[in-house]
Image: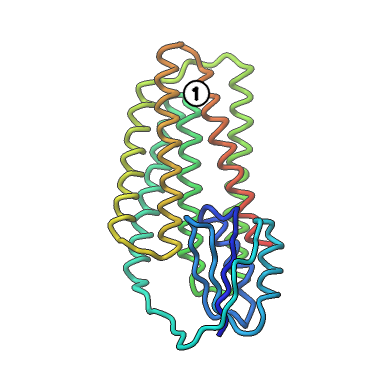
Amino acid sequence: MQKTTFKISKMDCPSEEQMIRMQLADLTNIDSLDFDIPNRQLTVFHLDHYDKIFQRLDNLKFDTSLIDSVTVDNYSITSENTYRERKLLWQVLAINFFFFALELTTGFVSNSMGLVADSLDMLADSMVYGLALFAVGGTMSRKKNIAKSAGYFQLILAIFGFMEVVRRFVGLEQVPAFLTMIIISLLALTGNGLCLYLLQKSKSKEAHMQASMIFTSNDVIVNIGVIVAGGLVYLTKSIYPDLIVGTIVFFIVGQGAFKILKLSK
């Protein structure tokens, strides 16, 4: 059995991990994959030479390089408590989807594009968690179809969001309800904090769980951005802080959609 470790400089969230898994899924010489997202490394246990594996990784354009490749003896896969991890991911997915619905509704009621954009960011998280859960045990064709549907749906939402932001920039719109923006974003921040607590409480060292923590940590930054925008709306009595934050978050959502769409190729 060969143990080959790669440095993948642009692997920093669950989307890249899923892309790599699907890119390598049909290689029959691979026994297991061990992801180290914080250090951006992938260790592959495989038979034969690593040339085909490296070629597949290099095609993703994630700046892949070889660290080392050695022969290992007495290799065995450690059994995982998949039930507990699946249950935890379902909990995190449910929290994200709840706040997607809450922020989307209150975003339109309060005239805040920042809240609407943040709701779509929550939806993007739900899609990533759902994609991993629903695709487990499925065929390659099923996984690609799921990724394609999720990616296009998210991209359409991002495009409509950008169009609405442009319309509000050039039109005469009411100033968003800053208090609603701040209160709902604080609730969403609490929800993401709960997700982080649940993920950290699991003490799982598995890559997908570590990646989920990184992904949720990024959402906390988005929540804080909307809270700041709410404060600036109050101070300036202007719609522009809300629209600027909305634009930034819609851009993030659009980027996530393109990453997911790469999974379906």
Q: Amino acid at mark 1?
A: Asp
Q: Is residue 229 left or right of residue 146?
A: left
* Residue 146 coordinates in the image, percent (x, y): 57, 62
50 or 191: which is nearer to us? 50
Q: Residue at x 50, y 75 (%)?
A: 137
* Residue 58 coordinates in the image, percent (x, y): 69, 63
Q: Is residue 69 above or below residue 163?
A: below
110 or 244: which is nearer to us? 244
* Residue 20 coordinates in the image, percent (x, y): 60, 64
Quadrant of the drawing holding the C terminus: bottom right
Q: Secondary structure at mark 1?
A: helix
Q: Residue at x 33, y 28 (%)?
A: 183
Q: Is residue 77 above or below residue 191?
A: below
Quadrant of the drawing holding the N terminus: bottom right
Q: Is residue 196 above or below residue 175?
A: below
Tag 1 residue: 242
Q: Is residue 169 left or right of residue 97?
A: right
